């Protein structure tokens, strides 16, 4: 193999390893409870795998586009609804995106630029995290739309045969089934194609028509499905109206109260879109100009503020419970590729069509690819505007964000354009850098630092200071952690995690009044800050204040007993020691359990169903000497299947396999010295699952259920 090939192989392996690291971190093995967007895509994929194409899991929210669920359906059918397997397929698509980036960049710009672009994509945290962490559309959509642009541009040069035109249409149609925003790109692509083929427009028109036919051939069957189910015309999904009104609300709009009252998603979508358009027409300067411009110009400031408020993966770090380093890594990478991408666009267009030796990817003599043997051994450093379709996509998506989806900060949909052109800039960067004088280099470095500071805000330095003190608080002994956490609050008074840490330190010290005040400050910054809710619950537990504890559980949004808790937070949070966890009571179980279904009755018992992996935490084991673990459980008799056996693991070590009966029964497991040596005991239950809708006639319950668990106790 040539050295060039070894470099490409190394980059592909590095890309795979980085994405697997995010995959491993993302709690894909039962530690993570799906919620909202990814839950809807996941449940729809499960329904598709079972052949149920005429039912939506959450129609009262909105109907989802089917492209991503259709992608996951084969793996769900073959391996069951396993998140870890589904995310592996997503990781593989992301690695293919790395290879596709190289292929596109080599054809459009040149081989050296392609290697740089491939490296940028291989190490891109934006793409690695979205592939390995969530069941979301970013990865598959980015790959499909880039593949469409590549094939459409290449075949436009080589000859758009009728089969190729149909293939492009089918690919664009599937991209639109993933994210319907791709539908309207047909107009942009068609106009570009007709312009490039203006000398023979009569030949080009049938090709454009066939692209449209291919696209709608994939879309219209789902439109028909929507009409059959809802008796309304919905092209693909019912999210566009919701987005339009959400991003263009007027003061005191009844957005959150009115839409849930409209039962039919088609009516809901139409009504929301009309209200959003009305608001735009009433004040276009504010609704489009101010909001759209503010979003594009201050993206990283908005994300830093979002992270400081504890707003989860909305920071675009695209991982569960992101940390400051992950957020900064994503943002600094994004800033880097945008700056170099713009430079690459300028450099490429200044070259115009000057071929400095050419790299005719796919268009070499006899269809070959003369490795290192392009004309005169050179590259197209500059190219002949083969990257024009990329810029059209960038302009198109930017316009959508600016006008329509002003609150969107989903970068993977267009960042690949900057990545490819950044490769062009880096390929020439060393030569350009050598030509600069020392003074010019200092100016460039200074300007880059200034851009970085302006891109963020004056909040950046205080945030670093606060994180420094928080790191000290985590390593200090009791008492000193309070002082360090107070310094973290003083460094950045609007940083919710600093107040959380201060509240935790006071709570561990037994100063409950100060702990509640710190948690209240965190909740003032972000009412949904879960760590503050957990801290307040734990204080009320230790005080024995059942009334306040119940109210706090309701304030956290768990009246039904549903658990919406990031797995990393659950593993790191230290609640008060307990010997008994009652699964049928959210006030005594919340914070101690992970990956269970909601509370429900079973005759006179209240219990929760387990999942394939469910966890219970017992802090304070060294405070007493328990000799056994007791769990109160029963199996559900499933026709033609043996009764469930529960596998029990203690702190990750398998200790028992317990056959369950159809009657509620206590099951005992002895505890040895190795278990009692750790202050916190994590009990993991594993069991086969069943889906009621599959095994019980008339059931519409599509949950995957394990066994019934009433309580777990250390004795």
Image (cartoon, helix red, strand yellow):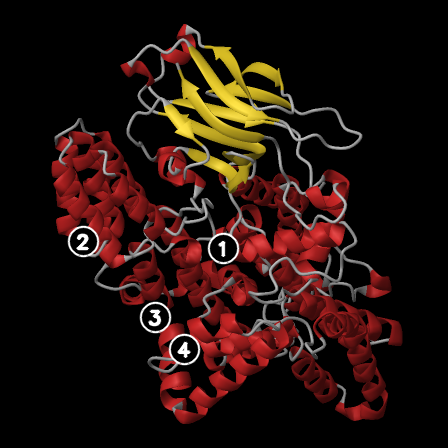
Among numbered discs 1 and 4, the one appearing first in the sequence: 1
What secondary structure is marked by label 2?
loop
In terms of sequence position, does the residue under pointer 4 or pointer 2 come before the other? 4
Does the residue at mark 3 contact the one at mark 4 (Cβ under 8 Å)? Answer: no
In the rendered structure, which disc, 3 or 4, sits on the residue that comes first in sequence? 4
Name which of mark 1 and mark 2 comes first in the sequence. Answer: 1
> In the figure, is residue 206 to the left or right of 597?
right
Nearer to us in this view, 456 or 498 = 498
The label on residue 254 is 4
Residue at 62 percent across and 46 percent down: it is: 91
Kind of element beneath mark 3: loop
Report, in whole angstroms, how far the alpha carbon at label 3 lies from the one at label 2. 20 Å
Label 3 environment density (alpha carbons within 10 Å; few <14, some 14–19, many ≥20): some
* Spatial separation of the CA atoms under disc 1 and disc 2: 27 Å
Tell me the number on the disc at residue 126: 1
Q: Which residue is mark 3?
A: 298
Residue 177 spot, x, y in % from top left: 69, 67
Are dots 1 and 3 in contact, CB under 8 Å?
A: no
Q: 499 or 713: which is nearer to us?
A: 713
């Amino acid at each position: 193999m040539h050295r060039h090939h070894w470099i490409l192989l190394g980059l592909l392996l590095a890309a795979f390893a980085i994405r697997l690291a995010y995959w491993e971190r993302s709690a894909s093995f039962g530690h993570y409870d799906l919620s909202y967007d990814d839950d809807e895509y996941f449940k729809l994929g499960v329904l598709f795998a079972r052949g149920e194409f005429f039912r939506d899991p959450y129609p009262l929210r909105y109907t989802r586009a089917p492209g991503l669920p259709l992608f996951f359906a084969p793996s769900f059918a073959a391996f069951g609804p396993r998140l870890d397997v589904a995310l592996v397929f997503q990781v593989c698509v992301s690695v293919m995106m790395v290879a596709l980036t190289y292929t596109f960049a080599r054809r459009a710009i040149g081989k050296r630029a392609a290697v740089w672009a491939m490296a940028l994509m291989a190490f891109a945290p934006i793409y690695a995290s979205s592939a390995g962490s969530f069941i979301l559309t970013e990865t598959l959509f980015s790959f499909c739309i880039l593949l469409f642009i590549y094939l459409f541009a290449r075949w436009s040069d080589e000859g758009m045969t009728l089969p190729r035109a149909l293939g492009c249409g089918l690919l664009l149609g599937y991209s639109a089934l993933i994210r319907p925003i791709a539908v309207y790109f047909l107009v942009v692509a068609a106009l570009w194609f007709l312009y490039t083929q203006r000398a023979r427009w009569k030949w080009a028109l049938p090709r454009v028509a066939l692209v449209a036919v291919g696209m709608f051939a994939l879309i219209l069957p789902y439109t028909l499905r929507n009409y059959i189910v809802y008796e309304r015309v919905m092209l693909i999904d019912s999210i566009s109206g919701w987005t339009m009104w959400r991003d263009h609300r007027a003061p005191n709009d009844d957005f959150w109260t009115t839409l849930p009252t409209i039962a039919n998603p088609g009516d809901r979508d139409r009504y929301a879109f009309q209200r959003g358009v009305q608001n735009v027409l009433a004040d276009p300067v504010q609704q489009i100009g101010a909001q759209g411009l503010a979003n594009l110009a201050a993206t990283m400031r908005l994300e830093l503020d979002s992270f400081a408020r504890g707003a989860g993966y909305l920071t675009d770090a695209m991982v569960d419970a992101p940390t400051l380093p992950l957020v900064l890594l994503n943002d600094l990478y994004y800033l880097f590729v945008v700056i170099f991408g713009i430079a690459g666009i300028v450099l490429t267009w200044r070259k115009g069509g000057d071929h400095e030796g050419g790299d005719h990817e796919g268009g070499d003599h006899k269809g070959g690819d003369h490795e290192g043997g392009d004309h005169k051994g050179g590259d197209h450093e500059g190219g002949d505007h083969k990257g024009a379709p990329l810029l059209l996509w960038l302009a198109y998506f930017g316009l959508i964000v600016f006008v329509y989806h002003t609150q969107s900060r989903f970068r993977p949909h267009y960042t690949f354009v900057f990545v490819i052109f950044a490769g062009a800039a880096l390929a020439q960067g060393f030569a350009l850098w050598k030509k600069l004088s020392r003074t010019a280099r200092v100016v460039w470095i200074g300007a880059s630092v200034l851009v970085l500071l302006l891109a963020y805000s004056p909040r950046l330095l205080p945030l670093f200071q606060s994180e420094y003190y928080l790191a000290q608080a985590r390593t200090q002994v009791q008492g000193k952690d309070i002082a360090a956490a107070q310094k973290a609050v003083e460094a950045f008074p609007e940083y919710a995690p600093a107040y959380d840490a201060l509240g935790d330190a006071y709570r561990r010290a037994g100063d409950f009044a100060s702990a509640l005040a710190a948690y209240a400050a965190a909740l003032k910054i972000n009412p949904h800050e879960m760590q503050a809710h957990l801290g307040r619950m734990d204080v009320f537990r230790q005080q024995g204040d059942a009334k306040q504890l119940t109210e706090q559980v309701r304030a956290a949004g768990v009246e039904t007993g549903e658990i919406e808790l990031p797995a990393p937070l659950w593993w790191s949070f230290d609640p008060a020691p307990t010997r008994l966890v009652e699964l049928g009571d959210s006030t005594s179980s919340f914070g101690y359990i992970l990956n269970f279904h909601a509370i429900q009755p079973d005759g006179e018992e209240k219990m929760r169903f387990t999942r394939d992996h469910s966890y219970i935490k017992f802090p304070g084991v060294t405070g007493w000497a328990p000799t056994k673990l007791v769990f109160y459980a029963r199996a559900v008799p499933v026709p033609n299947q043996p009764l469930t056996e529960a596998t029990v693991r203690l702190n990750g070590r398998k200790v028992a396999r317990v056959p369950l009966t159809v009657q509620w029964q206590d099951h005992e497991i002895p505890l040895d010295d190795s278990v009692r040596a750790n202050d916190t005991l994590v009990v993991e239950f594993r069991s086969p699952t069943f889906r009621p809708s599959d095994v019980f006639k008339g059931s519409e319950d599509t949950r995957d259920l394990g066994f019934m668990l009433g309580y777990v106790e250390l004795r």
